[in-house]
Amino acid sequence: MSRRFDHLGDVETFVTVVEKGSMTAGAVALATTPSVLSRAITRLEARLGVQLLRRTTRRLSLTEPGRLYLEQSRAAFALIDDAERAMQGQGDELTGSVRLSAPTTYAHHRLPAQLQRFSAQYPQVRVELNITNRNVDLVAEGYDLAIRMGPLPDSGLVARKLEDAPMCLLAAPAYIARAGAPGSVGELARHACLPFVMPSTGRVSPWIPRDEGCDVDWTPHGSLQVSDDVMGVVSLALSGLGICQTYDFIALDLIAQGRAVEVLTQARGRSRPFSVIYAPHRRLSSASRALIDSLAGTAT
């Protein structure tokens, strides 16, 4: 038996494109591409047997069936929203599910304690956690929320900052015993540094020390280079293969255990932001809103 409403994603696409005024603006709002939206609307028109939109190179306009379908679709989505909120408001406990994507650093070293607190407070909410360093397509892949590192581009997504995470330079005691510790940022060029290639750009992620009080973006070079999983540079550094840049929330435990030492402590002081993002066209469920509030309130 086929599902009756497996086309609702295409209906949501149609509503968003009309509200935004163009395929391009709709694609920005939904964090996808105009071609994906165009195919979705074509599928919907084929299903209904009517033309919903007149499309030219310059503008979109609704047909009369399109105008009627838009009104009915908006009303239907409003009813679904109302029903979900009513059900989630029943009883003393919040229910529902949240699909969350997070990068490896945050997922392994920040989220466990945060999700433990959230689960204790909302035991009936199911969190489906995807751990990847790839920037998922929230709408096309069906995610409610995603955690992203660094300054966010003007993508049309809504972002709430979770924290500014301080960074430091790290090496194993064995490396320092063998190669010595750099005395300045300039001396890093003479050391074995462990660069990380960012999946989103294919470029080496710059290190961000402070040099004599000035912020510096310094590109590391080394015979070993890591891609895809940034935790790889930490593993290599712990093996004594060189110096890496990482977050304090990763480094501090390793330093306390004696497995690593911080180098160039005088160069610390800068940080990178982490934010939780979601698509603005969707009304967040009560469970998603509760998770956002919990994550933003527990980062320390």
Image (tube, rainbow, N blue to C red):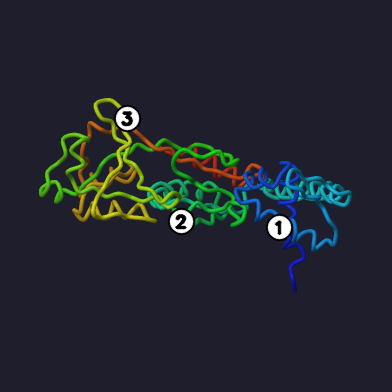
Q: Secondary structure at mark 2?
A: strand
Q: Earlier in the sequence, mark 1 or mark 2?
A: 1
Q: Specify the amino acid type for callout 2.
A: Ile
- C-alpha distance separating marks 1 and 2: 28 Å
Q: Secondary structure at mark 3?
A: strand
Location of residue 270 in the rendering, given as x and y in whole percent from the top left corner = 34, 33
Looking at the rendered structure, the number of numbered marks drawn on it comes to: 3
- Report the residue marked by disc 3: 215
- C-alpha distance separating marks 3 and 1: 46 Å
Tell me if mark 3 has few (under 14), some (14-19) or many (20+) residues whose alpha carbon lies within 10 angstroms of its own: some
Q: Specify the amino acid type for callout 3.
A: Asp
Quadrant where the C terminus sits is: top left
Tell me if mark 2 has few (under 14), some (14-19) or many (20+) residues whose alpha carbon lies within 10 angstroms of its own: some
- Report the residue marked by disc 1: 40
Residue 292 placement: quadrant: top right
**Residue at point 30%, 38% (across, down):** 218
Location of residue 12 in the rendering, given as x and y in whole percent from the top left corner = 72, 51
**Residue at point 45%, 46% (across, down):** 114
**Residue at point 45%, 39% (across, down):** 298
Q: Earlier in the sequence, mark 3 or mark 1?
A: 1
Quadrant where the N terminus sits is: bottom right
- Report the residue marked by disc 2: 131
Q: Are marks 3 and 2 in contact (CB under 8 Å)?
A: no
**Residue at point 47%, 46% (across, down):** 117
Q: Is residue 43 left or right of residue 29?
A: right
Q: Specify the amino acid type for callout 1.
A: Ala
Looking at this view, name the residue that lies furthest to the top: 213
Q: Is residue 110 left or right of residue 37?
A: left
Q: Earlier in the sequence, mark 3 or mark 2?
A: 2
